[in-house]
Image (cartoon, helix red, strand yellow):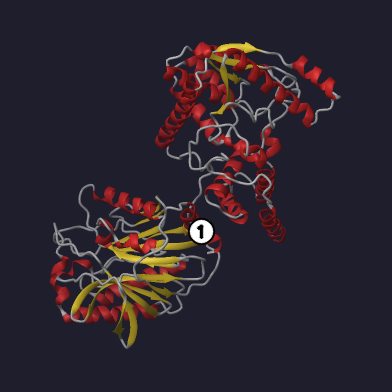
Amino acid sequence: MQNGFIKVAALTPHIRVADPIYNAERICECIDEAEANKAKIMVFPELCITGYTCHDLFLQERLLEEAKRALMIIAAHTDGVDALVFVGLPLERENRLYNVAAVINCGEIMGFVPKTFIPAYGEYYETRHFAAGNRIPVMMDFDGEEIPFGTNLLFTSDAIEGLCVACEICEDIWVADPPSTAHAIAGANVIVNLSASNEIVGKDEYRKMLVESTSARLICGYIYANAAEGESTQDVVFGGHNIIAENGTVLAEVKKFTCENIYTDLDIHRLRSERRRMNSYAAVSDREYMMVPFAIVREETVLNRTFAKQPFVPQNKEKRRIRCEEILSIQSFGLKKRLAHTHAKTAVIGISGGLDSTLALLVTAKAFDLLGLDRKGIKAVTMPCFGTTDRTYDNACRLSEILGADLMEVDIKEAVRIHFRDIGQDESCHDVTYENGQARERTQVLMDIANKTGGLVIGTGDMSELALGWATYNGDHMSMYGVNAGVPKTLVRHLVHFYADTCGDDKLEKILQDVLDTPVSPELLPPEDGKISQKTEDLVGPYELHDFFLYYMLRCGFSPMKVFRLALSAFAEDYDAETIYHWLETFYRRFFAQQFKRSCLPDGPKVGSVAVSPRGDLRMPSDACGDIWLEELEELHVILGNLGG
């Protein structure tokens, strides 16, 4: 449970209808399996001690007494089991029968949560047997013990800071105002649902959507355990469709009719981070709740869930296609508005033949089309200097020509040499002044061409470069509208790839594919044997790692140790621990040291949930101290050293 992770399970035993002792044995077997899998929250289906389909047998005292005896067997079995267990049964209180979830921890019954909404439509007639549960908890006697009984029970543990679990039962999630809404407002970040939801055509899709959307709306983990094999098939069939979701994402799901138990890891720290971020999320409940502490041992969770190497890029091909199309539209519509508002006659772009300037040019072409403007108004400026290679130069020129832009070439070598002479810079000294002098000269050229032609300079720098500060201050750092400012480098690549696949122009596609194959470089150092000598990722690290760090640091607020752990899991086959640590340290050092560049960024469109604009998502002091993050990295480095890397 370190780093906020807790392993959870949705469990569906093979039961017999109206045979509580047999069912208790099957439930105990599932508990043993879940314990072996290190699950700390275990959820069983609705009424699984008796079976949901007992019908009028629920009115038989013999069945109710055996259900209580079975519950005691299950509770005794959990003595020594390090978990919070939810199991369903019928329970009588004050001459009324309730459909409840018994909540068990370490051999003790911690509470009874009754079902709130009792269905009596279609194939359901639960009101024939069960009463609706009370919200405000009361104490009831059960086997000589006083046990809280009510829907407003919150189960808390200090094993994970902030962990708070609440329960609802089946129909409760399907109604307009489910109990889970109030539970979440009161502080619950894990909701469990004991369900007996039968299968009809298409219901599984709606059920999944319901669980997924509820977890998103409430910013919670949601564990849905459904009835299956063993229930009566007299009139309906149950498929055991178990689902576990977190904040709008299904982490684990079993295909209906396969009747399998599922396990995954919920990230409580991330849920808390999301709630902190969304300040419109109600945090105070006006309803009375009882807090019930439970005990689980704090230990490291072996992770079942996986983490995408590229969190900014959808893994599903169709979703990726839709995402790329949407982002290109956001970029181009943003630029369209800016061009129209300023009555710009031209758009001026420095074209290098690299990925970022290629994407900016594609976006600008689309914006001109939306405005009904001639693409000749796009001034595509190539500015060869000491590091320019034939490959990137040719691609820049050919790309501009095919897109119909007005290609301009301004060789800046002589101007840079004059500048070096003026400031006493030795051209043979390839230091940062040598590099930045070229970058600032290029920006000056673009700004002056924009003045001359009545246009705007379109920025090409992407969000990954801005996060690392990999931009020359008042050089490529500056523009009049930065269309790529909200797009991380890993996504830039997919956007260009998408354009290549959908443009319908073989020549354009071929050039774009070659741009994609070209190493990322600012080309500020002389080439070696005609090839790029300065590769960005050799200097600042792989962008796929930095984008991963950026997402989990900014979007989720994770600590360096947790970011490292997730990266180690995601990139286990690509980088060793020392390599990941090295570039993670680079990321944090640069991120804090380079905020002053981000504090004066030009305007640019936000396209995703992470952005670094000083006017929007990242209002961070330019001189913020990063020591506490770097100190944690030093602690991590000591741990790695003790583990032998």
Left or right of 233 on screen, residue 159: right
Q: Is residue 531 above or below residue 255?
A: above
Q: Nearer the viewer, residue 247 or 258?
A: 247
Q: Position of residue 441 (x, y in %)?
A: 71, 21
Q: Nearer the viewer, residue 21 or 136?
A: 136
Which quadrant would residue 595 be assigned to in this image?
top right
Q: Is residue 356 above or below residue 146?
A: above
Q: Which residue is labeled 1 in the image?
A: 269
Which quadrant would residue 190 be assigned to in this image?
bottom left
Looking at the image, which residue is at 65% across and 17% down?
A: 448
Q: Is residue 191 visible?
A: no
Q: How many marks?
A: 1
Q: Position of residue 256 (x, y in %)?
A: 29, 53
Question: Mark 1: which amino acid?
Answer: His
Callout 1 environment at 10 Å: few (<14), some (14 to 19), or many (20+)?
A: many
Looking at the image, which residue is at 38% across and 61% down?
A: 184
Looking at the image, which residue is at 48% across and 36% down?
A: 607
Q: Is residue 423 above or below residue 277?
A: above
